[in-house]
Amino acid sequence: MDKFMIEGGERLFGSIRAQSAKNSVLPLLAASVLTDRVVTIREIPPISDVTCMAQILRELGAEVRLNDGAAVIDSSNAGEHRISSALTKELRSSVFMLGSLLTRFHRAVTAYPGGCDIGLRPIDLHLNALKRLGVNISERDGYIFCECDRLRGAEIVLDFPSVGATENILLAAVKAEGRTVLSGAAKEPEIVDLQNFLNRMGARVRGAGGDTIVIEGVKTLGGVDYTPVKDRIEAGTYLIACAVCGGEVEVEGVKPENVGLLLHKLRENGCKIHTKNDKIRIASYGRLKCNRRIETMPFPGFPTDLQAQATALNATAEGGTLVVENLFETRFKYVPELIKMGADIEVRGRTAFVRGVPRLNGATVTAGDLRGGAALLLAALGAEGTTELLDLSHIDRGYSDPEGKLRELGAHIRRVRI
Ligand code: EPZ
Protein backbone atom coordinates (compact mmCIF):
# COMPACT_ATOMS: atom_id res chain seq x y z
CA MET A 1 0.00 0.00 0.00
CA ASP A 2 1.62 3.28 -1.10
CA LYS A 3 1.81 6.54 0.82
CA PHE A 4 2.58 10.16 -0.07
CA MET A 5 5.19 12.22 1.78
CA ILE A 6 4.25 15.88 1.32
CA GLU A 7 6.19 19.00 2.39
CA GLY A 8 3.46 21.66 2.56
CA GLY A 9 3.70 25.40 1.93
CA GLU A 10 4.81 25.56 -1.71
CA ARG A 11 2.80 27.76 -4.06
CA LEU A 12 1.79 26.15 -7.37
CA PHE A 13 2.62 27.52 -10.82
CA GLY A 14 2.15 26.06 -14.28
CA SER A 15 -0.43 24.23 -16.40
CA ILE A 16 -1.83 20.73 -16.60
CA ARG A 17 -4.15 18.93 -18.99
CA ALA A 18 -7.16 17.14 -17.51
CA GLN A 19 -7.48 13.37 -17.97
CA SER A 20 -10.50 11.77 -19.65
CA ALA A 21 -13.41 11.76 -17.24
CA LYS A 22 -13.45 8.66 -15.01
CA ASN A 23 -17.24 9.00 -14.74
CA SER A 24 -17.58 8.98 -18.51
CA VAL A 25 -15.02 6.29 -19.39
CA LEU A 26 -16.71 3.80 -17.05
CA PRO A 27 -20.18 3.94 -18.70
CA LEU A 28 -18.55 4.06 -22.16
CA LEU A 29 -16.69 0.82 -21.36
CA ALA A 30 -20.00 -0.69 -20.24
CA ALA A 31 -21.60 0.50 -23.51
CA SER A 32 -18.90 -1.21 -25.57
CA VAL A 33 -20.63 -4.60 -25.15
CA LEU A 34 -23.80 -3.29 -26.80
CA THR A 35 -22.24 -4.20 -30.15
CA ASP A 36 -20.22 -7.13 -31.48
CA ARG A 37 -18.10 -4.68 -33.52
CA VAL A 38 -14.79 -3.21 -32.35
CA VAL A 39 -14.95 -0.19 -30.05
CA THR A 40 -11.97 2.12 -29.44
CA ILE A 41 -11.96 4.56 -26.52
CA ARG A 42 -8.97 6.93 -26.65
CA GLU A 43 -6.98 8.70 -23.91
CA ILE A 44 -7.99 6.12 -21.32
CA PRO A 45 -6.80 7.33 -17.86
CA PRO A 46 -4.53 4.74 -16.16
CA ILE A 47 -6.65 4.54 -12.99
CA SER A 48 -7.72 1.45 -11.10
CA ASP A 49 -11.49 1.87 -11.63
CA VAL A 50 -10.83 1.61 -15.38
CA THR A 51 -8.61 -1.44 -14.90
CA CYS A 52 -11.39 -3.03 -12.88
CA MET A 53 -14.04 -2.32 -15.52
CA ALA A 54 -11.73 -3.77 -18.19
CA GLN A 55 -11.45 -6.92 -16.05
CA ILE A 56 -15.26 -7.15 -15.85
CA LEU A 57 -15.44 -6.96 -19.67
CA ARG A 58 -12.80 -9.69 -19.98
CA GLU A 59 -14.77 -11.92 -17.60
CA LEU A 60 -17.74 -11.52 -19.94
CA GLY A 61 -15.56 -12.85 -22.76
CA ALA A 62 -14.64 -9.58 -24.42
CA GLU A 63 -11.10 -8.97 -25.61
CA VAL A 64 -9.77 -5.70 -24.15
CA ARG A 65 -6.42 -4.38 -25.30
CA LEU A 66 -4.94 -1.25 -23.71
CA ASN A 67 -2.36 0.20 -26.09
CA ASP A 68 -0.95 3.62 -26.69
CA GLY A 69 -3.40 5.13 -24.22
CA ALA A 70 -6.48 3.68 -25.92
CA ALA A 71 -8.76 0.78 -24.98
CA VAL A 72 -9.72 -1.42 -27.93
CA ILE A 73 -12.66 -3.69 -27.05
CA ASP A 74 -13.82 -6.59 -29.20
CA SER A 75 -16.80 -8.30 -27.56
CA SER A 76 -17.76 -10.40 -30.62
CA ASN A 77 -16.96 -13.55 -28.62
CA ALA A 78 -18.55 -12.37 -25.39
CA GLY A 79 -21.18 -14.79 -24.11
CA GLU A 80 -21.12 -14.54 -20.33
CA HIS A 81 -23.92 -12.49 -18.77
CA ARG A 82 -22.90 -12.85 -15.12
CA ILE A 83 -20.66 -10.31 -13.39
CA SER A 84 -18.49 -11.69 -10.60
CA SER A 85 -19.39 -10.54 -7.09
CA ALA A 86 -15.78 -9.64 -6.28
CA LEU A 87 -15.64 -7.14 -9.13
CA THR A 88 -19.11 -5.76 -8.36
CA LYS A 89 -18.04 -5.08 -4.79
CA GLU A 90 -14.78 -3.59 -6.07
CA LEU A 91 -16.49 -1.29 -8.51
CA ARG A 92 -20.01 -0.07 -7.76
CA SER A 93 -20.43 1.41 -11.19
CA SER A 94 -20.47 -2.15 -12.59
CA VAL A 95 -24.24 -1.84 -11.96
CA PHE A 96 -24.69 -0.12 -15.30
CA MET A 97 -23.41 -3.27 -16.96
CA LEU A 98 -26.99 -4.53 -16.36
CA GLY A 99 -28.35 -2.28 -19.11
CA SER A 100 -25.68 -3.32 -21.59
CA LEU A 101 -25.96 -7.05 -20.89
CA LEU A 102 -29.75 -6.97 -21.12
CA THR A 103 -29.55 -5.24 -24.49
CA ARG A 104 -26.93 -7.70 -25.76
CA PHE A 105 -28.06 -10.96 -24.17
CA HIS A 106 -31.52 -10.24 -22.66
CA ARG A 107 -30.05 -11.63 -19.44
CA ALA A 108 -27.81 -10.30 -16.66
CA VAL A 109 -26.75 -11.46 -13.22
CA THR A 110 -24.78 -9.36 -10.79
CA ALA A 111 -24.13 -9.26 -7.08
CA TYR A 112 -25.84 -6.49 -5.20
CA PRO A 113 -23.21 -3.74 -5.32
CA GLY A 114 -22.17 -3.06 -1.72
CA GLY A 115 -22.59 0.30 -0.04
CA CYS A 116 -19.36 2.16 0.45
CA ASP A 117 -17.84 4.81 2.60
CA ILE A 118 -20.00 7.61 1.31
CA GLY A 119 -23.44 6.07 1.79
CA LEU A 120 -25.81 3.16 1.23
CA ARG A 121 -26.04 3.78 -2.54
CA PRO A 122 -29.18 1.72 -3.27
CA ILE A 123 -30.09 0.81 -6.85
CA ASP A 124 -33.91 0.87 -6.61
CA LEU A 125 -34.15 3.58 -9.29
CA HIS A 126 -32.12 1.40 -11.69
CA LEU A 127 -34.23 -1.73 -11.07
CA ASN A 128 -37.62 0.02 -11.23
CA ALA A 129 -36.64 1.57 -14.57
CA LEU A 130 -35.49 -1.77 -15.99
CA LYS A 131 -38.84 -3.32 -14.96
CA ARG A 132 -40.61 -0.53 -16.91
CA LEU A 133 -38.60 -1.65 -19.96
CA GLY A 134 -39.93 -5.21 -19.60
CA VAL A 135 -37.21 -6.82 -17.48
CA ASN A 136 -38.12 -9.52 -14.93
CA ILE A 137 -35.97 -9.10 -11.84
CA SER A 138 -35.52 -11.40 -8.87
CA GLU A 139 -33.11 -11.06 -5.97
CA ARG A 140 -31.66 -14.00 -4.07
CA ASP A 141 -28.69 -14.41 -1.69
CA GLY A 142 -27.31 -10.99 -2.55
CA TYR A 143 -27.57 -11.53 -6.30
CA ILE A 144 -29.83 -9.79 -8.83
CA PHE A 145 -31.20 -11.95 -11.66
CA CYS A 146 -32.50 -10.05 -14.70
CA GLU A 147 -34.03 -11.48 -17.85
CA CYS A 148 -36.48 -10.43 -20.57
CA ASP A 149 -37.93 -11.84 -23.79
CA ARG A 150 -37.50 -8.42 -25.33
CA LEU A 151 -36.90 -4.85 -24.19
CA ARG A 152 -39.72 -2.50 -25.03
CA GLY A 153 -39.71 1.30 -24.93
CA ALA A 154 -41.54 2.95 -22.04
CA GLU A 155 -42.27 6.22 -20.28
CA ILE A 156 -39.92 6.40 -17.28
CA VAL A 157 -39.88 9.03 -14.56
CA LEU A 158 -36.93 9.27 -12.16
CA ASP A 159 -37.96 10.91 -8.90
CA PHE A 160 -34.28 11.66 -8.33
CA PRO A 161 -31.85 12.55 -11.15
CA SER A 162 -29.59 9.55 -10.52
CA VAL A 163 -26.51 9.59 -12.80
CA GLY A 164 -26.11 5.82 -12.82
CA ALA A 165 -29.79 5.09 -13.29
CA THR A 166 -29.95 7.55 -16.21
CA GLU A 167 -26.98 5.81 -17.82
CA ASN A 168 -28.43 2.34 -17.24
CA ILE A 169 -31.71 3.39 -18.85
CA LEU A 170 -29.93 4.68 -21.95
CA LEU A 171 -27.96 1.42 -22.23
CA ALA A 172 -31.10 -0.71 -21.86
CA ALA A 173 -33.32 1.40 -24.17
CA VAL A 174 -31.06 1.94 -27.21
CA LYS A 175 -32.23 -1.25 -28.94
CA ALA A 176 -35.59 -1.64 -27.20
CA GLU A 177 -38.67 -1.90 -29.42
CA GLY A 178 -40.17 1.57 -29.76
CA ARG A 179 -39.56 4.83 -28.00
CA THR A 180 -38.44 5.46 -24.41
CA VAL A 181 -39.07 8.84 -22.83
CA LEU A 182 -37.03 9.43 -19.67
CA SER A 183 -38.15 12.34 -17.50
CA GLY A 184 -36.22 13.60 -14.49
CA ALA A 185 -32.92 12.54 -16.07
CA ALA A 186 -29.52 13.46 -14.62
CA LYS A 187 -27.96 16.37 -16.58
CA GLU A 188 -24.24 15.77 -15.93
CA PRO A 189 -21.83 16.31 -18.88
CA GLU A 190 -21.00 12.59 -18.70
CA ILE A 191 -24.59 11.81 -19.74
CA VAL A 192 -24.17 14.02 -22.81
CA ASP A 193 -20.90 12.17 -23.55
CA LEU A 194 -22.68 8.81 -23.35
CA GLN A 195 -25.43 10.08 -25.70
CA ASN A 196 -22.78 11.21 -28.22
CA PHE A 197 -20.98 7.87 -27.96
CA LEU A 198 -24.19 5.85 -28.46
CA ASN A 199 -25.29 7.99 -31.41
CA ARG A 200 -21.89 7.45 -33.04
CA MET A 201 -22.66 3.71 -32.75
CA GLY A 202 -25.92 4.29 -34.63
CA ALA A 203 -28.29 4.84 -31.70
CA ARG A 204 -30.97 7.52 -31.73
CA VAL A 205 -30.76 9.36 -28.39
CA ARG A 206 -31.61 13.04 -27.90
CA GLY A 207 -32.08 15.49 -25.03
CA ALA A 208 -29.13 14.51 -22.79
CA GLY A 209 -28.09 17.46 -20.62
CA GLY A 210 -31.76 18.37 -20.09
CA ASP A 211 -34.59 16.96 -17.97
CA THR A 212 -36.03 14.70 -20.66
CA ILE A 213 -34.15 12.22 -22.84
CA VAL A 214 -35.86 10.44 -25.76
CA ILE A 215 -34.44 7.16 -27.05
CA GLU A 216 -35.78 5.64 -30.31
CA GLY A 217 -34.87 1.92 -30.30
CA VAL A 218 -32.75 0.81 -33.28
CA LYS A 219 -32.04 -2.64 -34.68
CA THR A 220 -28.26 -2.64 -34.82
CA LEU A 221 -25.34 -0.77 -33.27
CA GLY A 222 -21.94 -0.55 -34.94
CA GLY A 223 -18.40 0.05 -33.71
CA VAL A 224 -17.04 3.47 -32.73
CA ASP A 225 -13.70 5.25 -32.24
CA TYR A 226 -14.25 7.85 -29.51
CA THR A 227 -12.39 10.31 -27.28
CA PRO A 228 -14.26 10.91 -23.99
CA VAL A 229 -14.95 14.27 -22.36
CA LYS A 230 -12.29 15.48 -19.91
CA ASP A 231 -12.61 15.08 -16.14
CA ARG A 232 -14.29 18.12 -14.58
CA ILE A 233 -13.79 16.72 -11.07
CA GLU A 234 -10.07 16.17 -11.57
CA ALA A 235 -9.81 19.68 -13.05
CA GLY A 236 -11.77 21.13 -10.12
CA THR A 237 -9.52 19.30 -7.67
CA TYR A 238 -6.38 20.96 -9.13
CA LEU A 239 -8.04 24.38 -9.26
CA ILE A 240 -8.84 24.03 -5.56
CA ALA A 241 -5.26 22.83 -4.94
CA CYS A 242 -4.01 26.15 -6.33
CA ALA A 243 -6.55 28.09 -4.28
CA VAL A 244 -5.32 26.32 -1.12
CA CYS A 245 -1.58 26.69 -1.86
CA GLY A 246 -1.55 30.05 -3.62
CA GLY A 247 0.04 30.67 -7.03
CA GLU A 248 -1.23 30.60 -10.62
CA VAL A 249 -2.35 27.45 -12.41
CA GLU A 250 -4.05 26.79 -15.75
CA VAL A 251 -6.10 23.63 -16.31
CA GLU A 252 -6.75 22.67 -19.93
CA GLY A 253 -9.41 20.48 -21.51
CA VAL A 254 -12.53 21.20 -19.48
CA LYS A 255 -15.31 23.57 -20.55
CA PRO A 256 -15.81 26.28 -17.88
CA GLU A 257 -19.57 25.65 -17.88
CA ASN A 258 -18.88 22.10 -16.68
CA VAL A 259 -17.40 23.49 -13.45
CA GLY A 260 -19.51 26.65 -13.42
CA LEU A 261 -20.53 26.76 -9.79
CA LEU A 262 -17.03 25.87 -8.56
CA LEU A 263 -15.61 28.89 -10.44
CA HIS A 264 -18.27 31.08 -8.82
CA LYS A 265 -17.30 29.74 -5.37
CA LEU A 266 -13.56 30.24 -6.01
CA ARG A 267 -14.22 33.87 -6.98
CA GLU A 268 -16.19 34.18 -3.72
CA ASN A 269 -13.02 32.99 -1.92
CA GLY A 270 -11.11 35.87 -3.55
CA CYS A 271 -9.37 33.90 -6.31
CA LYS A 272 -8.99 35.43 -9.77
CA ILE A 273 -10.43 33.18 -12.48
CA HIS A 274 -10.00 33.68 -16.24
CA THR A 275 -11.46 31.32 -18.83
CA LYS A 276 -10.87 30.99 -22.60
CA ASN A 277 -12.44 28.11 -24.55
CA ASP A 278 -11.40 24.96 -22.63
CA LYS A 279 -8.70 26.71 -20.55
CA ILE A 280 -9.35 27.78 -16.96
CA ARG A 281 -6.74 29.91 -15.20
CA ILE A 282 -6.76 30.57 -11.43
CA ALA A 283 -4.64 32.97 -9.40
CA SER A 284 -4.70 32.85 -5.59
CA TYR A 285 -2.69 35.13 -3.27
CA GLY A 286 -3.04 35.79 0.45
CA ARG A 287 -5.53 34.29 2.88
CA LEU A 288 -8.86 33.37 1.27
CA LYS A 289 -12.28 34.47 2.41
CA CYS A 290 -14.64 31.61 3.38
CA ASN A 291 -17.60 30.57 1.21
CA ARG A 292 -20.09 30.80 4.11
CA ARG A 293 -22.24 28.09 2.44
CA ILE A 294 -21.49 25.12 0.14
CA GLU A 295 -24.52 22.97 -0.72
CA THR A 296 -24.06 19.97 -3.02
CA MET A 297 -26.73 19.44 -5.67
CA PRO A 298 -27.15 17.44 -8.89
CA PHE A 299 -25.60 19.10 -11.96
CA PRO A 300 -25.43 22.05 -12.58
CA GLY A 301 -25.36 22.53 -8.78
CA PHE A 302 -22.18 22.28 -6.72
CA PRO A 303 -20.78 18.77 -7.37
CA THR A 304 -20.78 16.34 -4.44
CA ASP A 305 -17.47 15.01 -5.82
CA LEU A 306 -15.84 18.37 -4.99
CA GLN A 307 -17.44 18.74 -1.55
CA ALA A 308 -14.51 17.32 0.42
CA GLN A 309 -11.98 19.41 -1.51
CA ALA A 310 -14.00 22.61 -0.95
CA THR A 311 -14.25 21.81 2.76
CA ALA A 312 -10.46 21.45 2.93
CA LEU A 313 -10.14 24.84 1.25
CA ASN A 314 -12.49 26.51 3.74
CA ALA A 315 -10.65 24.89 6.67
CA THR A 316 -8.04 27.69 6.40
CA ALA A 317 -10.21 30.45 4.91
CA GLU A 318 -11.25 33.48 6.97
CA GLY A 319 -14.64 32.98 8.61
CA GLY A 320 -17.14 30.15 9.00
CA THR A 321 -18.64 27.92 6.29
CA LEU A 322 -21.68 25.63 6.38
CA VAL A 323 -21.23 22.60 4.11
CA VAL A 324 -24.41 20.66 3.31
CA GLU A 325 -24.05 17.26 1.57
CA ASN A 326 -27.39 16.51 -0.11
CA LEU A 327 -26.37 13.59 -2.33
CA PHE A 328 -24.84 11.02 0.02
CA GLU A 329 -25.54 10.13 3.65
CA THR A 330 -21.99 9.87 5.01
CA ARG A 331 -19.62 11.85 2.86
CA PHE A 332 -17.74 13.56 5.74
CA LYS A 333 -15.59 10.61 6.86
CA TYR A 334 -12.44 12.52 5.92
CA VAL A 335 -13.18 15.25 8.52
CA PRO A 336 -11.55 13.54 11.54
CA GLU A 337 -8.34 13.32 9.50
CA LEU A 338 -8.51 17.05 8.72
CA ILE A 339 -9.02 17.70 12.45
CA LYS A 340 -5.76 15.79 13.13
CA MET A 341 -4.12 18.51 10.97
CA GLY A 342 -5.66 21.24 13.13
CA ALA A 343 -8.93 21.92 11.30
CA ASP A 344 -11.89 23.19 13.35
CA ILE A 345 -14.91 21.34 11.87
CA GLU A 346 -18.06 20.02 13.49
CA VAL A 347 -20.16 17.42 11.62
CA ARG A 348 -23.85 16.81 12.32
CA GLY A 349 -25.40 14.29 9.88
CA ARG A 350 -25.28 15.80 6.40
CA THR A 351 -23.96 19.15 7.61
CA ALA A 352 -20.46 20.27 8.54
CA PHE A 353 -19.65 23.63 10.13
CA VAL A 354 -16.12 24.76 9.26
CA ARG A 355 -14.38 27.50 11.28
CA GLY A 356 -11.37 28.70 9.30
CA VAL A 357 -8.00 28.52 11.10
CA PRO A 358 -4.87 30.39 9.87
CA ARG A 359 -2.91 27.25 8.92
CA LEU A 360 -3.11 23.46 9.13
CA ASN A 361 -0.15 21.43 10.33
CA GLY A 362 1.35 18.35 8.70
CA ALA A 363 0.34 15.02 10.28
CA THR A 364 -0.03 11.33 9.51
CA VAL A 365 -3.50 10.89 7.95
CA THR A 366 -5.29 8.09 6.11
CA ALA A 367 -7.50 8.32 3.03
CA GLY A 368 -10.83 6.48 3.43
CA ASP A 369 -12.42 7.15 0.03
CA LEU A 370 -11.53 8.69 -3.33
CA ARG A 371 -12.58 12.33 -2.89
CA GLY A 372 -11.91 12.41 0.86
CA GLY A 373 -8.38 11.30 0.04
CA ALA A 374 -8.08 14.13 -2.49
CA ALA A 375 -9.20 16.59 0.19
CA LEU A 376 -6.46 15.37 2.56
CA LEU A 377 -3.92 15.72 -0.26
CA LEU A 378 -4.93 19.36 -0.84
CA ALA A 379 -4.85 20.11 2.90
CA ALA A 380 -1.36 18.61 3.13
CA LEU A 381 -0.10 20.72 0.22
CA GLY A 382 -1.17 23.90 2.02
CA ALA A 383 -0.16 22.79 5.55
CA GLU A 384 2.89 23.80 7.57
CA GLY A 385 5.39 20.91 7.70
CA THR A 386 5.34 17.30 6.59
CA THR A 387 2.27 15.12 6.00
CA GLU A 388 2.27 11.37 5.56
CA LEU A 389 -0.87 10.43 3.56
CA LEU A 390 -1.60 6.70 3.85
CA ASP A 391 -3.63 4.28 1.69
CA LEU A 392 -3.36 5.78 -1.78
CA SER A 393 -5.50 2.97 -3.26
CA HIS A 394 -8.52 5.29 -3.00
CA ILE A 395 -6.87 8.26 -4.77
CA ASP A 396 -5.46 5.91 -7.43
CA ARG A 397 -9.01 4.86 -8.31
CA GLY A 398 -9.75 8.23 -9.88
CA TYR A 399 -6.63 10.38 -10.33
CA SER A 400 -3.90 9.48 -12.85
CA ASP A 401 -0.36 10.38 -11.69
CA PRO A 402 -1.38 13.01 -9.09
CA GLU A 403 2.14 13.29 -7.69
CA GLY A 404 3.60 13.81 -11.18
CA LYS A 405 1.10 16.54 -12.02
CA LEU A 406 1.57 18.28 -8.66
CA ARG A 407 5.37 18.06 -8.82
CA GLU A 408 5.17 19.72 -12.26
CA LEU A 409 3.32 22.58 -10.55
CA GLY A 410 6.05 22.90 -7.87
CA ALA A 411 4.66 20.76 -5.04
CA HIS A 412 7.06 18.82 -2.83
CA ILE A 413 5.43 15.40 -2.96
CA ARG A 414 6.73 11.88 -3.42
CA ARG A 415 5.15 8.43 -3.47
CA VAL A 416 6.69 5.81 -1.17
CA ARG A 417 5.93 2.16 -1.65
CA ILE A 418 5.43 0.40 1.71
C1 EPZ B 1 -22.25 8.83 -9.91
O1 EPZ B 1 -22.54 7.86 -8.92
C2 EPZ B 1 -20.74 9.05 -9.83
N1 EPZ B 1 -20.05 7.81 -10.13
C3 EPZ B 1 -20.38 9.54 -8.42
O2 EPZ B 1 -18.97 9.82 -8.43
C4 EPZ B 1 -21.13 10.84 -8.14
O3 EPZ B 1 -20.86 11.25 -6.82
C5 EPZ B 1 -22.64 10.60 -8.30
O4 EPZ B 1 -22.90 10.07 -9.63
C6 EPZ B 1 -23.44 11.89 -8.13
O5 EPZ B 1 -23.00 12.84 -9.04
C7 EPZ B 1 -19.91 7.43 -11.44
O6 EPZ B 1 -20.38 8.09 -12.34
C8 EPZ B 1 -19.15 6.17 -11.69
P1 EPZ B 1 -26.36 8.66 -8.24
P2 EPZ B 1 -24.01 7.19 -8.85
O7 EPZ B 1 -27.09 7.47 -8.72
O8 EPZ B 1 -24.52 6.98 -10.22
C9 EPZ B 1 -29.27 7.79 -4.61
C10 EPZ B 1 -16.78 9.75 -7.61
O9 EPZ B 1 -16.25 10.18 -6.57
N2 EPZ B 1 -29.77 6.67 -5.41
O10 EPZ B 1 -26.55 9.97 -8.97
O11 EPZ B 1 -23.95 6.04 -7.92
C11 EPZ B 1 -27.87 7.51 -4.09
O12 EPZ B 1 -27.94 6.76 -2.89
C12 EPZ B 1 -18.12 9.05 -7.55
O13 EPZ B 1 -16.28 9.85 -8.77
C13 EPZ B 1 -30.88 5.97 -4.97
O14 EPZ B 1 -31.45 6.27 -3.92
O15 EPZ B 1 -24.81 8.37 -8.14
C14 EPZ B 1 -27.32 8.88 -3.84
O16 EPZ B 1 -27.80 9.35 -2.59
C15 EPZ B 1 -18.65 8.97 -6.13
N3 EPZ B 1 -31.33 4.92 -5.70
C16 EPZ B 1 -27.96 9.72 -4.95
O17 EPZ B 1 -29.09 8.95 -5.44
C17 EPZ B 1 -30.72 4.54 -6.88
O18 EPZ B 1 -31.20 3.59 -7.53
C18 EPZ B 1 -27.02 10.04 -6.10
O19 EPZ B 1 -26.67 8.82 -6.67
C19 EPZ B 1 -29.59 5.27 -7.32
C20 EPZ B 1 -29.13 6.33 -6.57
Image: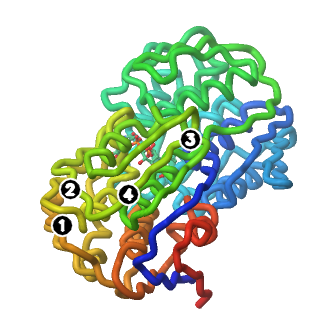
Name the disc covering residue 284, or none: 4
Q: Along the polypeptide, which appears first: circle 1 or circle 2?
A: 2
Comparing marks 1 and 4, which lies closer to the viewer? 4
416 lies above or below 67: below
Comparing marks 4 and 3, which lies closer to the viewer? 4
Which structural element holds mark 2?
Answer: loop
**Residue at image mark 3:** 279
Tell me the kind of residue under disc 2.
Answer: Cys
The percent coordinates of residue 72 (x first, y second) are 83, 45
Residue placed most toward the observer, 290 or 136: 290
| Marks 1 and 2, how far apart at CA | 7 Å
Q: Which quarter of the image is occupied by the N terminus?
A: bottom right
Q: Which quarter of the image is occupied by the C terminus?
A: bottom right
Which structural element holds mark 3?
Answer: strand
Q: Residues within 10 Å of mark 2 (few under 14, many from 20)?
A: many
Residue 86 visible from this viewpoint:
yes
Q: Is mark 3 within 8 Å of ligand 1?
A: no
Name the disc covering residue 290, or none: 2
Q: Along the polypeptide, which appears first: circle 2 or circle 3?
A: 3
Which structural element holds mark 4?
Answer: strand
**Residue at image mark 1:** 356
| Marks 3 and 1, how far apart at CA | 30 Å
The percent coordinates of residue 372 (x first, y second) are 38, 65
